[in-house]
Amino acid sequence: MTKTLEVLIEEFGEQKVKYSEEYFEKYGTDWYKEIKPDPLAIFFPESEIDLKKIVQFANEANQPLVISGGRTGLCGGATAGNKELVVSLERMNKIEWSEDKKQVFCEAGAITDVVKDFVNSHDRLLPISLASSSSSSVGGNVATNAAGSKFIRYGSTKDHVAKIKVMLANGEVLTLQKEIQKDATGPNLMELFFGSEGSLGIIFEIVFNTCEKPKFLETIVLTSDDIDAVKNHILSPEIKKFISSVEYWDRNCQTLLDDDPKKNYFIVIELVSQQDQAMQICLENLADKELDLALLTSKQAEEIWSKREDLPVVLASKGAYKMDVSVPLDKLKDFLEQLKKLESTEIFSFGHLGDGNIHVNIVSSTKQSELIEETYKLLKQCGGSPSAEHGIGQRKKGIWTDFNEYQDKYKLLKTLKKSMDPKNILSPKVFFE
Ligand SMILES: Cc1cc2nc3c(=O)[nH]c(=O)nc-3n(C[C@H](O)[C@H](O)[C@H](O)COP(=O)(O)OP(=O)(O)OC[C@H]3O[C@@H](n4cnc5c(N)ncnc54)[C@H](O)[C@@H]3O)c2cc1C
């Protein structure tokens, strides 16, 4: 046992400090399995006071910390591979409702689905919709600015945040808020923490605004050989205003899910409205288009969404290399067709079609690196983003140098990191070498 670990246990006790292999395996890593977990220990704070003490301890001992939420991240942001002390927020999970403001207060370790169900029990909606929401934490959602299947209508996590409390690397606590829409008091510095992936501060409390629940909801499937059918017919202004989700999966994914693919793309469209009549007009509008469409019952819709949620899990079990890119909609057809030409059987794609967010999954034992490189080359030609919603973590740091357009952002990020965390205590391996 190292001296630092001895002091930790003495100071906080074995209830809050865990250091067995079993804990290392579970809390030392996220979904990105390429970094072997090797933490110093796992610390479970139960209050702001515990958090402050651990940050002070880390400063005195020059001990790097890795902040851990639900560990569903796909880029190694919550992975401790170099004797970092993992700070798991799972015991900080209180939730409270404010009827007055229709807001939900959460400690950061609260599980996303638990918060969503709680909001639902107050007849409201928190539209953070990820296949990982049964395990992810709301703190992790804010720290990665998670998006997901309802981005097209509701935006990403940051669009629902009214207030956060963050502990900085020196133990100072900031309360940042965006309660008033029109607010020109300088830059909105709360934005700094959306997507900061544990490297600029520990987000420990969040207040979310909630939305009105849609009264009417319909799910439609569209099968097509032409991906532009969505852009040309479904995303037209008269239909788009009803859309809350447009997801797709390709022929290879259909086969993987034991379906018999009739067309290249299987597309699921969710429509919402507060008025039945408006929804009926939208459906009539769609029926007039010459598309291969089917309206689903709620039971069928549930089955289809469950299949969609299974996809990343099934692909992970096949050892897929996961890429998370976004492509401008007018380049999407070209991108997907060129992707198919690279390799027709080892590339599986699915994603949030309405936002051009494609999850490219490469399952190849022989050509993986080559296919990754070619995919990024195609992406550059299309002017897309190499990380649409999964972040950078420890895994995608190459983006800063490989993609010219991110170099200035990287410079600014380095400057911020230096001034906010001069001792490099918080997730030193996230974003930076
Ligand atoms: C099956 C599957 C489907 C997914 N689908 C989507 C999707 O549709 N859209 C999407 O955006 N993502 C998706 N993800 C990725 C992932 O679920 C999200 O990034 C999620 O927001 C991570 O939350 P978490 O609590 O698991 O965070 P973790 O994995 O624990 O951490 C993620 C990062 O945030 C930091 N962090 C965590 N909590 C805090 C905190 N309180 N304060 C400061 N930093 C913190 C960590 O240090 C790390 O860098 C998916 C993942 C899986 C496995």
Image (cartoon, rainbow, N blue to C red):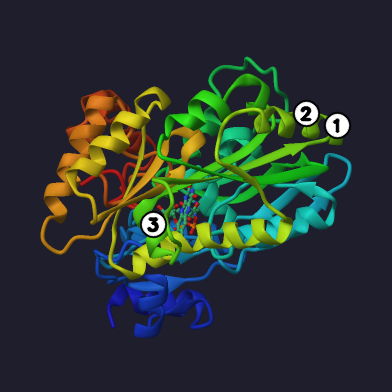
- Between residues 225 and 303, which one lies in front from this camera angle? 225
- Name the residue type under label 1: Gln
- Find residue 253 and name its label: 3
Instruction: Tell me if 272 is positioned left or right of 414 in this view.
Output: right
| Residue at image coords 42%, 71% | 27
Instruction: Tell me if 75 is positioned left or right of 149 in this view.
Output: left
User: Which dot, 3 or 2, sits closer to the camera?
Assistant: 2
Give the alpha-carbon distance from disc 1 to disc 3, as whole Å.
36 Å
- Find residue 277 and name its label: 1
- Name the residue type under label 2: Ile
Q: Quadrant of the N terminus?
A: bottom left
Callout 3 secondary element: helix
Callout 1 secondary element: helix
Position of residue 408 relative to residue 256, above or below, is: above
Residue 251 rendering spot, x and y as whole percentages:
37, 52
User: Of label 1 and label 3, which has the lower sequence position?
Assistant: 3
Callout 2 secondary element: helix
Give the alpha-carbon distance from disc 2 to disc 1, as whole Å.
6 Å
Q: How many marks?
A: 3
Residue at the farthest top position: 184
Quick check: marks 2 and 1 in contact, CB under 8 Å? yes
| Neighbours of disc 3 within 10 Å: few (<14), some (14-19), many (20+) | many
Instruction: Residue under label 2, please give it.
Output: 281
Instruction: Tell me if 156 is positioned left or right of 228 in this view.
Output: right
Position of residue 196 relative to residue 346, above or below, is: above
Residue 395 rendering spot, x and y as whole percentages:
27, 51
Q: Is residue 167 visible?
A: no
Q: Is residue 350 visible?
A: yes
Residue 349 rendering spot, x and y as whole percentages:
36, 49
Residue at the farthest right position: 100
